[in-house]
Image (cartoon, grey):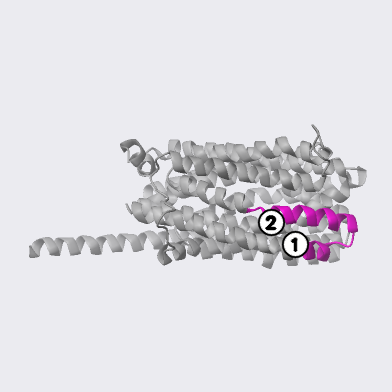
């Protein structure tokens, strides 16, 4: 391997932290912003078909999020294991982690295919009685689930490269997928340039086409270029230690995101008791909030391997510097997002062809829910920190507490006693309660882990001294 490539991951232990975090986060933030643009444009086009089409996509969203949860779990687990192994100087084990991560991604994609064929339609019918919504929702989610292999493989390969400090290839793969989707959306939905008019089905086809092209790009980059990790198909075999290492962080991450899917399903059920318009508004919110949350997720994509590497290398100073900078940047992004949601809610809703009833309901919803953004800025960084040091279960605990213990009960009780507008307040209530509980836990965990590493190093030094004396 070339010396330049060998140094790619080592920069995470030597480059000034501010410059390093910027170099690794900005490409990811940019690509995530493009991804956000695709999410919004996708729904804007669907909204032109009608409110039922937008409701159908909103009803299908929890299942789509569930599939994404498994892809992210495998990708984050692989990223965390690779970064820690590189920090410890174990390059071969890091390569095994990448190979086993891709293997798990393929297996999960096959499971998604089976579930898409046999269970997707039943879920949509359970969530709505409107036959048009059921038809469009079933078409959309069936295509997304049965053709999810592109997303699974692309996310795992991109996360593997990010763990080595390579943020450019993942950024370009995101751009390839998002731009493909944006270009194909109007063509497939409205039947332009001789293509048949497919409506919501066309939106689904455009989505998976973008994912598959992104996957092809990142695979080609894996094959054609040298990296700090090497992936080999020939002679591959699943390795128990790698699979368990990935699952230790990845499974809690999957469950954490799956809990999010369950939460949206529960909130949709509560909102359906008021009106289908409320469900459509929640769908609009999740598309719009991606513009705020996706850059923060891009920040964590850059910060997580830095924290993981320096944790593995027992460099507390660089670890803490990265954590503090991440908190500051995340807070600033979320504060700007909150201001935008308060100042321009009508403009945002106009993009989705909102009628007067939806506009009145939506303005209140966007303003109230956005109050949760600043609290979420701390929660997201804490979650990534736990994942970086191998404490994925604590990330899961945060998510379960926030979404199942706080959000759903609060939404139900507030809606029952105070009406629809009070339902939206469940989001900021849950975020800030979660931060109050887990911030001191995060401080204690970091102190404990570095004390443990210091003790291990002292023991190793004593053993080496005794060995030298004996010789």
Which residue is situated farthest in the right direction here?
A: 356
- Write the residue at 78% across / 62% down: 121
Question: For this view, does 220 lie left or right of residue 236?
Answer: right
**Callout 1 secondary element:** helix
Earlier-in-chain disc, 2 versus 1: 1
Task: Examine the rendered structure and indicate whether residue 449 appears above or below residue 82.
Answer: below
Residue named by callout 2: 145
How busy is the neighbourhood of tag 2: few (under 14 within 10 Å), some, or many (20 plus)? many
Quarter of the image for residue 467 reads: bottom left
- Residue placed most toward the observer, 215 or 356: 215
- Residue placed most toward the observer, 47 or 139: 139
Residue named by callout 1: 120
Which residue is situated farthest in the left direction here?
A: 471
How busy is the neighbourhood of tag 1: few (under 14 within 10 Å), some, or many (20 plus)? many
Q: Is residue 344 visible?
A: no
**Callout 2 secondary element:** helix
Q: Are marks 2 and 1 in contact (CB under 8 Å)?
A: yes
The x, y position of residue 123, in whole percent, is 77, 64
The x, y position of residue 246, in whole percent, is 47, 61
Separation (CA) of disc 2 from disc 1: 8 Å
* Magenta segment boundaries in residue numbering: 121-148
Is residue 138 within the magenta segment? Answer: yes
Q: Quadrant of the C terminus?
A: bottom left
- Residue placed most toward the observer, 65 or 153: 153
């Amino acid at each position: 391997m070339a010396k330049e490539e060998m140094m790619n991951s080592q920069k995470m232990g030597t480059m000034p932290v501010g410059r390093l975090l910027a170099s690794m986060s900005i490409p990811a933030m940019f690509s995530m912003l493009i991804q956000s643009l695709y999410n919004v444009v996708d729904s804007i086009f669907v909204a032109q078909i009608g409110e039922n089409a937008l409701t159908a996509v909103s009803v299908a969203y929890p299942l789509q999020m569930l599939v994404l949860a498994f892809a992210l779990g495998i990708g984050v687990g692989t990223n965390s294991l690779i970064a820690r192994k590189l920090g410890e100087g174990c390059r071969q084990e890091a390569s095994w982690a990448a190979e086993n991560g891709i293997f798990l991604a393929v297996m999960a994609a096959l499971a998604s295919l089976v579930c898409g064929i046999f269970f997707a339609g039943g879920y949509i019918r359970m969530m709505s009685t409107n036959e048009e919504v059921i038809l469009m929702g079933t078409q959309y989610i069936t295509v997304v689930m049965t053709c999810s292999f592109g997303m699974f493989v692309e996310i795992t390969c991109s996360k593997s490269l990010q763990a080595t400090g390579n943020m450019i290839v993942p950024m370009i793969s995101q751009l390839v997928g998002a731009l493909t989707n944006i270009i194909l959306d109007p063509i497939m939905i409205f039947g332009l340039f001789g293509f048949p008019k497919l409506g919501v089905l066309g939106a689904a086809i455009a989505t998976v086409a973008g994912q598959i092209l992104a996957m092809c790009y990142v695979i080609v980059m894996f094959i054609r270029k040298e990296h700090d990790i090497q992936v080999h198909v020939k002679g591959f075999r699943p390795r128990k230690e790698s699979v368990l290492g990935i699952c230790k962080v990845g499974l809690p991450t999957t469950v954490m995101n799956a809990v999010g899917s369950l939460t949206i399903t529960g909130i949709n059920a509560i909102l359906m008791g008021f009106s289908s318009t409320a469900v459509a508004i929640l769908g609009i919110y999740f598309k719009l909030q991606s513009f705020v949350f996706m850059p923060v997720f891009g920040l964590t994509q850059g910060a997580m391997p830095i924290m993981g590497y320096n944790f593995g290398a027992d460099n507390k100073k660089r670890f803490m510097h990265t954590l503090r900078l991440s908190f500051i940047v995340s807070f600033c992004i979320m504060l700007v997002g909150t201001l935008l949601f308060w100042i321009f809610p009508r403009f945002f809703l106009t993009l989705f062809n909102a009628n007067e009833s939806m506009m009145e309901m939506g303005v209140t919803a966007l303003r109230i829910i956005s109050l949760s953004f600043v609290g979420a800025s701390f929660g997201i960084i804490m979650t990534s920190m736990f994942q970086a040091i191998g404490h994925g279960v604590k990330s899961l605990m945060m998510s379960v507490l926030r979404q199942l213990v706080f959000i759903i009960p609060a939404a139900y009780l507030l809606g029952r006693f105070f009406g629809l507008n009070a339902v939206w307040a469940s989001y900021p209530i849950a975020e800030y309660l979660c931060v109050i509980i887990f911030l001191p836990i995060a401080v204690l965990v970091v102190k404990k882990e570095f004390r443990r590493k210091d003790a291990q190093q002292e023991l190793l030094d004593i053993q080496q001294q005794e060995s030298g004396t004996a010789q």
